[in-house]
Image (spheres, rainbow, N blue to C red):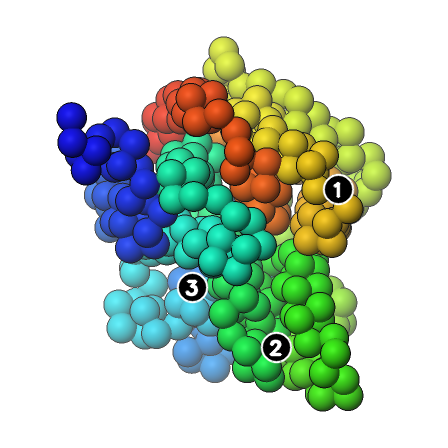
Amino acid sequence: MDNKFSFAHYFNRLANPLYGFVFAIVLYFAFSTLGGSPFRVNEFVYFNYLADAFTHGQLHLRLMPESTLDLSFYNGNYYLYWPPMPAIVLMPFVALFGVGFSDVFFCVVLASANVAVVAALLRSVNHERIIVMDEAYRGLLILFFTLGTVHVTMASFGGVWFTAQLLGFLFVGLAYISAIHFRGATAFLVVGVLMACAMLTRNHLLFTGIWPAYYLLSKYWKERPKLYSYIALALLPAVVLGLLFLLYNYMRFGSPFELGIRYHEMSPFFVDDYNKYGAFNLHYLPINFYYQYIYYPFPFTSESFMGGSLFLLSPVFLYAFRGIFRGYSDPAIITWILSILATSVPILLLMGTGWMQYGPRYTLDFTIPLLMLTASGVRTAPKRLLIWLIAISIIQYIPGIMIFTYFQR
């Protein structure tokens, strides 16, 4: 058969960001129809309501959503305890279409953009010889990320939780690409803006910026004292947005450090633990570690909604250890490891495991550096074995989507 039409060549095309986006949006859109109209609105479309409040000059909700689960009730008003960047991004859409703007379709597009960003990032690190790998391996990794990771379970459902994680992932991915492609002051400023936006989407995503910071510093280390002004440019967006976030908290709850978690209407499932240990505590570490790295969700039970092992459900990620072993002295490898560990600390200490999910949802927050480590280990792996591991990942996640869809309806 002509190689042009071979099975391998088809997946090679996924290494192209445009092909990756089209591939993902067709699949994610199809998955979204399993739960009803792909243009439906999730019950927990809280960012739409916050966007509406912002457009009307207020910080508490002006209109009331169908549910108030997980909203913060304080002084007679409802607030969101999540950082507000998703609502800011949604403001023009809500201004045009109202709070009924489909967060399900928005997440489909957002998740597809994430696939394109990963493809662009893999192409960029190859071009700059940070991780040298051919088009076939990059295409296979895109196939894996699209259908064989927890990302696929968030792509087609909408809701406040998935929207925040998908948008945060996009900001981090764009920051990594910008660090590679932009030059001089522009690189530092753009990366700083994107990481600040990630921070105001999910605060701990700031730690994923360790590698872009290292990469830019190492590239311009010899250009001191000009480098100092570059660093100031990179830090300025985080400082400005961070201060605005503290002011946002103060104006809502009377304290710059109060997010509203203590006032939120949590599920009864968490009440006892919260009353004993609060929202962050070492008590949660073994529970979260178990559901993110050890627990296997098959055969399916109600416990399956607690999570699932990152490496059992997505065994391709095991190549990350190969990447670490083969490049443990490489500063890039070290910074990717540090990014994962630092981002994991608040995740592992947080009350709840990302409950009502399929797979280790919170691990998406550090999937960009994890993919870099995985790519470092995959690039010389036997393709046949890699394809089998991708198939195993997909086979485990697709039924999970079906089950999760059934219980979401």
Q: Judging from the image, what secondary structure is the residue with disc 2 in?
A: helix
**Labels 3 and 1: the sequence-earlier one:** 3
State yes or no: discs 3 and 1 in contact (Cβ < 8 Å). Answer: no
| Residue 219: mark | none
> Which residue is found at the position 34% from the left and 74% from the top?
92
In the rendered view, tell whether residue 352 sits above or below residue 399.
below
Q: What residue does disc 2 label?
A: 188
Q: CA distance from mark 2 to mark 1?
A: 27 Å
Q: What residue does disc 3 label?
A: 49
> x, y (%) of residue 138?
42, 43
Q: What residue does disc 1 label?
A: 328
Q: CA distance from mark 2 to mark 3?
A: 34 Å
> Which residue is found at the position 49% from the left and 36% from the top?
150
**Looking at numbered disc 2 in the image, what kind of residue is underneath it?**
Phe
**Looking at numbered disc 1 in the image, what kind of residue is underneath it?**
Tyr
Q: Judging from the image, what secondary structure is the residue with disc 1 in?
A: loop
